[in-house]
Image (cartoon, rainbow, N blue to C red):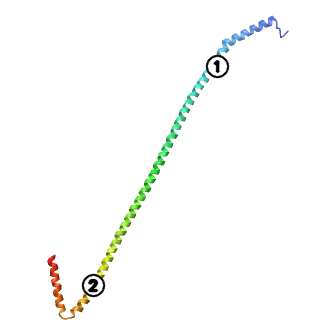
Amino acid sequence: MNLVTPEFGLLFWMVVIFGIVFFLLAKFGFPIITDMVDKRSAKIAQSLKDADEIQARMESWKKEHAQMLEDVRKEQSAILREATETKAKIIADAKEAAKAEADKMLSDAKLQIAAEKESALRDVRKEVALLSVQVAEKVLRHELQEEGNDRAFIDQLVDEAAKAEIRS
């Protein structure tokens, strides 16, 4: 038996056996194998389609996420700006209130000073009036001690009072 150059009988049986195996495979094996390959292809195609959809969703989510971040940044900026404006307003209001309070205190102090000044002037006038009356009393006593002067002085005072009353 020579393996390099087989005899005709060996070749015949090899072809017959190959034909039978090929027929059995073609009848029973290839349809199962092709069906499995088709199913696997469909599964791979569906997986690729799902992956594309997931990738599209991920891109959409990335855009939404970026938009949300931008909106949050804008809102944060607006809140910070509003807080700064509120702070400035509160400070301005506090300064205005403090100035108003200071002005009120200054006004009250001026009124109190004016009242105390008026009171002091009244006291000084009262003292001056009392001193004037005491001086006048002493002068009158001195003048009235002389005879005759008292009658003339009283007549003069009555005349002046009558003239002052007529004018009023």
Asked whether, in this view, residue 91 is left or right of residue 152, the answer is right
- Marks 2 and 1 sit apart, C-alpha to C-alpha, by 138 Å
Residue placed furthest toward the top: 8
Which residue type carries mark 1? Answer: Val
Q: Nearer the viewer, residue 138 or 79?
A: 138
Where is residue 59 drawn, in percent x and y? 55, 32
Q: Which part of the image, by quadrant, shows the C terminus?
A: bottom left
Q: Residues within 10 Å of mark 1 (few under 14, many from 20)?
A: few
Q: Quadrant of residue 151?
A: bottom left
Residue shown at the point (25%, 87%) measured from the top left: 136
The mark found on residue 132 in the picture is 2
Residue shown at the point (59%, 28%) measured from the top left: 51
Residue shown at the point (56%, 28%) measured from the top left: 53
* SS under mark 1: helix
8 to 62, vertically: above or below: above
Q: Nearer the viewer, residue 93 or 163?
A: 163
Where is residue 12 drawn, in percent x and y? 77, 6
161 to 18, vertically: above or below: below
Q: Quadrant of residue 9?
A: top right
Q: Which part of the image, by quadrant, shows the N terminus?
A: top right
Residue placed furthest toward the right: 1
Q: Residues within 10 Å of mark 2 (few under 14, many from 20)?
A: few
Asked whether, in this view, residue 25 is left or right of residue 9, the answer is left
The mark found on residue 37 in the picture is 1
**Chain-order first, disc 2 or disc 1:** 1
